[in-house]
Image (cartoon, rainbow, N blue to C red):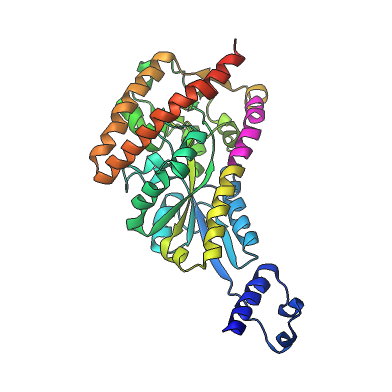
Amino acid sequence: MKRRKFITAISATAALGGLSACSQGESTCSSEEAPKAKTIKWKMVTTWPKNLQGLGVGAEYLANSITEMSGGRLKVKVYGSGELVPALETFNAVSAGTAEMGHGAAYYWKGKMAASPFFTAVPFGLTAAEIQGWLIKGGGYELWRELYAPFGVRPFIAGNTGTQMGGWFNKEIKSLEDIKGLKMRIPGLGGEILSRAGGVPVLMPGSEVFTALETGAVDAAEWVGPYNDLAMGLYKAAKYYYFPGWHEPGPNIEAIVNQESFDALPADLKAIVEQACHAANVNMQADFIAENNAALQVLVEQHHVKLKKFPDDVLIKLREISEQVVGEIANESELSKRILESYNQYKKQVRAWGDISEVAYYESLKL
Ligand code: CA
């Protein structure tokens, strides 16, 4: 019994550190070969173009972190959108086990689960810091797992872009009239809100945004913010760049894992997957925060993009519609109702604190 324990211990050490069992100085170990740890290989499918700044790079960071933290026992290989499955098939692929892991955003699965946008972004909802508080400490994670459980998929927080931009437009938005008939690439609840304001939302993955905007298949498109939008060359397809990103104030990026694949992992690899996701979350936010303004300067100064703020009356109307649209999700199911209640309850108290912390601080800078 004692001996078995010792062998287990040295194989774990060997697997983790690549050390020989005999380096432990145990006299009998020379005749024993520690069993080699099995290498597990996972495929990670993503909704992003491979290695795209911020998002695609975030997927690579996560895959590499898991591979390195596990000492190569769990090797994760990233596939960009369309390489193994189309971008918007990411969730289905992980659910079916075609890929063990995925990287994307929950609001792409709105057609499957009406409440999924709560786990990416709600228009006029939580910021990046606030949504993490809800997910990690405010009951959000538990509700998110419950929502995905029927599909055999386990979600993790794995990034955040911070507050996005309002998008690229080929005509100016001077009033609500300019929204009427506007065909725009905008996913999630933002799309539904645009529709009720008289626009025509279109859902497409990032890889198709440039062509759709350039050919006039859409009049406008939101993607992310300066760092990503510069990389995608969107300034070549539209000249007006609007802010703020009312529809995505701090979108959470998800990693999803096939539940059976996750359950089959030993406890240490499970912990590595979870902690690598959370490290990737911090890393992606740092990337966007450090890079966005420099990219914006390039867009404005070198590419002569016209930076515009949405008129107040447009934002006020969109916010009013947003409250209706978000409220209606509660009718979809008992779980949707609980998600909405949890989100709203959390938002109320976090906003009260925000008013006297960050909001008051930013205001003090403008005095
Ligand atoms: Ca976006």
Q: For this rendering, which residue is in front, 282 or 288?
A: 282
Question: Considering only vertical position in the picture, is 136 above or below 29?
Answer: above
How far across and down, in percent of the image, does residue 361 sit?
Answer: 57, 20
Image side of residue 336 versus residue 233, left or right: left
Predominant secondary structure, magenta span: helix
Q: For this rendering, which residue is in front, 211 or 50?
A: 50
Reply yes or no: does residue 289 show up in magenta: yes
How far across and down, in percent of the image, does residue 203 sit?
Answer: 39, 40
Count how many numbered circles sit on residues in the image.
Answer: 0
Given the current orientation, which residue lies at the most extreme top position?
Answer: 367
Image side of residue 156 versus residue 117, left or right: right
Image side of residue 36 versus residue 338, left or right: right
Give the residue displayed 32% in from the left and 32% down from the top. Answer: 326
How far across and down, in percent of the image, does residue 283 sit?
Answer: 61, 44
Given the current orientation, which residue lies at the most extreme bottom position?
Answer: 31
Could one spot residue 306 in this view of the protein?
Answer: yes
How far across and down, in percent of the image, does residue 221 sit?
Answer: 46, 32
Quarter assignment of residue 76: bottom right
Q: Quadrant of the C terminus?
A: top right
Given the current orientation, which residue lies at the most extreme front position?
Answer: 2
Question: Considering only vertical position in the picture, is 183 above or below 287?
Answer: above
Could one spot residue 170 in this view of the protein?
Answer: no
Give the residue displayed 61% in from the left and 47% down from the top. Answer: 57
Q: Magenta residues, as a range?
A: 284-298
Give the residue displayed 35% in from the left and 56% down from the top. Answer: 149
Reply yes or no: does residue 106 show up in magenta: no
Q: Quadrant of the N terminus?
A: bottom right
